């Protein structure tokens, strides 16, 4: 049973085909990387899979269920969480509040229960806070629990967004360029964090530019170029694939996704 | 309903529609230059009519002088409003700017009441004389003034936008303020000009219709809302849409008075506003916005 | 706003409890009907503004039409208790239900609208309601208004004195605050704040923007309708002029002054702004000329005021409090770090 099954995913914007008949599987408990030169369509792929964008054609199945028409918030409740290339944090509240909000999908206190302060609501709130602090500790942010998310430096913001995504206890985690802006030692720490996430039972799909990180952590890599999948396989094979090498060598600097 | 009555309603609709078109143009100009919906646009309409009428009766000046004074005063208010209330926070989010223009509209309405009194005022018709006959229907002379003024105003606007450097600058700002600045355009001046033009258009609309309907300090809100309805009916995209939206709104409103009821006349335009907002916010001629992730 | 570290449960409740106690015993110290009337108006505004704080301060949705819901509640209860002789509680239930329905009907089609489009839609809705209040004469009495609305009654107990009305309104206000405080501090409130902070981020947390907008609108409309019902039975007479655009703008001014993500801010603002036009009844020795002047210049002052807050203190009261707390925390951290 595959965790994620993408079939024939196509996204056309006016005259531009950003994704062209892309298909791949993601197996449970694995770490899959999606790489490609600038403009390859990686973020578009993420957006279509997580339903923040609507594909023109193709299907997405998550753990066997067709989610091609789902609303993005329903996917989170089903167990798929994601981060964004431009972090979408709640800047006016604390890091802790951000992570707590991430737990929305796995908690159930509604307006009435909250208004009446029912015991189960209070208990759920207490447990959610403990879990949020644990997640902050896991990414090394517990010192900043009460800091406003808007005040955090760039690298910590990305970590916070990952912690928030983890709060929904996802079975599939989509990370969009999580290591952007991290230095060598931070990247190494991040790789360890990825392993821990995988060991806790999640499947991870990562869009990344950092080749060292990608080669080290991935079980499999999908390579996109101009919307088309040009290679898929374990790192050492993809690394040697002539089509992949050519795609990267022919890349123009500054292209946008 | 016979053809003559229908024609009468149509004429009435086109007359009102021209007014809506002028106010809609005011909304469109400011929106194009700043991305802000100016809630005080209706008050420009009110100020034009009220100031002119007050100047004429209180200072005993000829009509032409009163009209000029009314336009000048409204434009001054519009420029002052932009400079003092909006420019300091021009980089704030849309919510802040909306609230500022809401506050401004309340302020202008209340100041008008203090300055010009709470009573209704009126201007005399620009030219006296009986209504003209057209295919059995009557056209008031002032209605001809309404259409004439609208045509001249739209033509003048077209000229400014297409043939002057200011117009070029305004078109550049419509695309992007940053790009405009890179081209050396003073975006602050453009925004000021936009407000000045919008105020002038609103004032002219208020003045030219004042002889037909009396005016008072509180007419701004509802007329502004109708003007906005006209603007988005066409789609907040350009001048043609604003004019088309205005005329269409006027005619639809008039026909619904003819066929439904006159009691709820104002509600028609408002219901149309809601329908457009709910069903097709880009208007008849606009493009749907794509949310970029 | 998240509670600061080290603030005990008692600390957080101390001030509200004190305020609640003060509010409750006040009528025992005065029987001036005018003063009690003014303070009852304060209570009514607190109810409406609490709802608007949820909608605007937490969920970030702007509404220029809340006076319409206030009016729907007032006319609904006013009409059925006069023309149809319904008992008060039934009228109140209808008032809340109809205004909630109104909020729902406005919110559902407005879901995709943001910023000025949403503001215009609420304004259009409010103006349509105003027209209906004036034109549906058989129900509303038109411009002449609806009179002879009976006092509220709870069972056999008629709320027919200024003190009783004060207590009824403030009991509802305090219960409302208690309930809504629970909502905004816990999961539902976080979902609303999330929507305000980043709609994409909120969706990435599993928050459905549709559900949040609809529930925030419905809740705030229901509260405005409840206040409207209490208002109608308190005054005995209502007319369309109380439910128009200027009232909506005044209410907006209160939440704007109050600041985002806070109940204490908007409530304080509601208290302040409602009291100021009636200052002569509170400050002894102040001539009634001041009051007349304030009421005459009400619109101008509110207009200037809204602009001034947006220009100079866009965070409102709650923003100012947070800045001060942040400054205090930084100073404390600096002191602790010093050798």
Image (cartoon, helix red, strand yellow):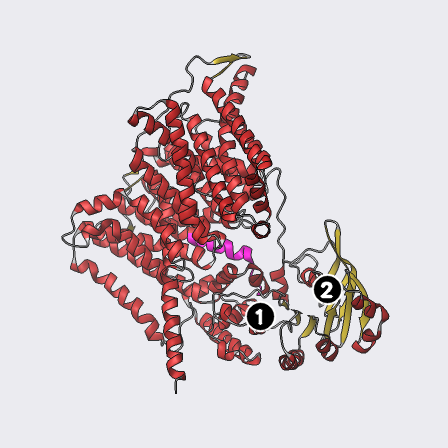
Residues drawn in magenta: C205-220
Chain identifier of the residue bearing label 2 in the image: A
Q: Residue at x 37, y 43 (%)?
A: B106
Instruction: Let me know if residue B258 appears in the view.
Output: no
State which quarter of the image contains the C terminus of chain A: bottom right
In this view, the residue in front, A239 or A11, is A239
Residue B109: x and y in percent read: 36, 39
Left or right: residue B127 compared with residue A215: left
Instruction: Let me know if residue C130 appears in the view.
Output: yes
Residue B4: x and y in percent read: 54, 15
Callouts 1 and 2 in the same chain: yes
In this view, the residue in front, C142 or A90, is A90
Given this view, does label 1 or label 2 mark the residue nearer the observer? 2
State which quarter of the image contains the N terminus of chain A: bottom right
Q: Secondary structure at mark 2?
A: loop
To which residue does mark 2 refer? A253
To which residue does mark 1 refer? A161
Q: Secondary structure at mark 1?
A: helix
Mark positioned earlier in the residue sequence (1 or 2): 1
Q: Is residue B38 above or below residue A11?
A: above
What secondary structure is the stretch in magenta mostly built from? helix
Asked whether B107 falls inside the magenta stretch, the response is no
């Amino acid at each position: 049973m595959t965790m994620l099954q993408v079939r024939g995913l196509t996204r056309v914007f006016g005259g531009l085909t950003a994704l062209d008949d892309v298909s791949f599987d993601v197996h449970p408990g694995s770490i899959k990387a999606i790489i490609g030169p600038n403009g390859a369509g990686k973020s578009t792929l993420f957006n279509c899979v997580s339903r923040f964008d609507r594909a023109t054609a193709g299907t997405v199945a998550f753990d066997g269920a067709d989610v091609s028409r789902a609303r993005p918030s329903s996917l989170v409740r089903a167990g798929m969480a994601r981060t964004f290339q431009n972090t979408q944090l709640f800047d006016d509240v604390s890091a802790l509040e951000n992570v707590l909000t991430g737990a929305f999908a796995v908690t159930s206190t509604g307006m009435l229960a909250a208004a009446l302060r029912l015991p189960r609501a209070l208990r759920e709130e207490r447990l959610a806070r403990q879990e949020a602090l644990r997640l902050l500790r896991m990414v090394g942010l517990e010192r900043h629990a009460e800091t406003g998310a808007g005040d955090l430096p760039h690298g910590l913001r990305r970590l916070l967004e990952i912690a928030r995504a983890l709060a929904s206890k996802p079975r599939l985690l989509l990370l969009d360029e999580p290591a952007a802006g991290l230095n060598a030692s931070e990247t190494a720490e991040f790789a360890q964090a990825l392993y821990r996430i995988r060991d806790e039972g999640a499947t991870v799909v990562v869009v990344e530019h950092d080749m060292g990180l990608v080669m080290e952590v991935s079980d499999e890599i999908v390579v996109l170029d101009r919307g088309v999948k040009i290679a898929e396989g374990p790192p050492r094979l993809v690394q040697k694939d002539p089509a992949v090498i050519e795609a990267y060598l022919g890349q123009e600097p500054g292209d946008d996704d | 309903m016979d053809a003559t009555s229908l024609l009468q309603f149509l004429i009435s609709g086109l007359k009102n529609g021209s007014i809506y078109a002028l106010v809609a143009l005011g909304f469109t100009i400011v929106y194009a230059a700043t991305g802000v919906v100016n809630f005080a646009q209706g008050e420009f309409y009110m100020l034009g009519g009220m100031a002119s009428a007050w100047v004429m009766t209180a200072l005993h000046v000829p009509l032409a002088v009163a009209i000029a004074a009314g336009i000048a005063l409204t434009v001054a208010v519009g420029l002052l409003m932009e400079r003092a209330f909006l420019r300091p926070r021009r980089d704030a989010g849309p919510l802040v700017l909306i609230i500022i223009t809401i506050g401004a509209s309340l302020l202008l309405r209340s100041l008008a009441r203090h300055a010009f009194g709470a009573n209704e005022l009126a201007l005399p018709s620009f030219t006296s004389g009986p209504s003209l006959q057209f295919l059995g229907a009557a056209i008031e002379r002032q209605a001809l003034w309404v259409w004439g003024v609208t045509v001249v105003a739209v033509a003048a606007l077209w000229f400014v936008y297409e043939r002057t450097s200011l117009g070029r600058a305004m078109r550049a700002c419509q695309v992007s303020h940053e790009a405009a600045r890179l081209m050396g355009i003073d975006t602050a001046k453009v925004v000021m000009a936009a407000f000045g033009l919008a105020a002038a258009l609103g004032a002219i609309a208020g003045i030219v219709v004042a002889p037909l309907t009396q005016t008072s300090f509180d007419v701004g809100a509802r007329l502004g809302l109708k003007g906005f309805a006209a603007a988005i009916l066409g789609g907040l995209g350009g001048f043609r849409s604003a004019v088309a939206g205005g005329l269409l709104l006027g005619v639809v409103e008039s026909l619904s008075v003819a066929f439904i009821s006159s009691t709820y006349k104002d509600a028609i335009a408002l219901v149309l506003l809601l329908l457009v907002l709910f069903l097709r916010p880009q208007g008849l001629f606009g493009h749907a916005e794509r949310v970029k992730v | 706003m998240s509670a600061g570290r080290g603030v005990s449960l008692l600390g957080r409740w101390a001030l509200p409890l004190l305020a609640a106690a003060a509010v409750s015993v006040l009528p025992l110290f005065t029987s001036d009907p005018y003063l009690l009337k003014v303070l009852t108006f304060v209570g009514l505004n607190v109810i409406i503004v609490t709802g608007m704080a949820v909608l605007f301060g937490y969920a970030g949705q702007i509404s220029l039409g809340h006076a319409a819901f206030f009016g729907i509640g007032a006319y609904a209860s006013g009409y059925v208790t006069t023309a149809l002789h319904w008992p008060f509680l039934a009228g109140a239930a209808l008032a809340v239900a109809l205004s909630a329905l109104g909020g729902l009907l406005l919110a559902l089609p407005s879901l995709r609208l943001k910023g000025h489009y949403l503001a215009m839609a609420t304004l259009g809705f409010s103006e349509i309601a105003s027209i209906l209040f004036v034109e549906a004469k058989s129900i509303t009495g038109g411009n002449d208004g609806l009179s002879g609305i009976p006092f509220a009654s709870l069972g056999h107990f008629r709320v027919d004195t200024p003190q009783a009305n004060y207590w009824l309104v403030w009991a509802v206000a305090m219960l409302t605050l208690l309930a809504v405080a629970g909502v905004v501090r816990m999961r539902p409130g976080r979902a609303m704040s999330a929507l305000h902070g980043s709609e994409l981020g909120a969706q990435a947390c599993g928050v459905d923007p549709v559900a949040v907008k609809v529930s925030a609108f419905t809740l705030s409309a229901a509260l405005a309708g409840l206040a409207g019902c209490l208002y109608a039975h308190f005054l005995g007479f209502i007319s369309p002029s109380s439910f128009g655009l200027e009232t909506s703008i005044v209410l907006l001014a209160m939440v704007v002054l109050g600041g985002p993500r806070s109940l204490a801010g908007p409530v304080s603002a509601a208290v302040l702004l409602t009291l100021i036009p009636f200052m002569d009844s509170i400050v002894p020795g102040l001539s009634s000329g001041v009051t007349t002047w304030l009421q005459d210049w009400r619109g101008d002052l509110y207009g200037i005021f809204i602009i001034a807050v947006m220009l100079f203190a866009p965070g409102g009261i709650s923003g100012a409090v947070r800045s001060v707390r942040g400054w205090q925390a930084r100073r404390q951290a600096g002191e602790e770090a010093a050798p």
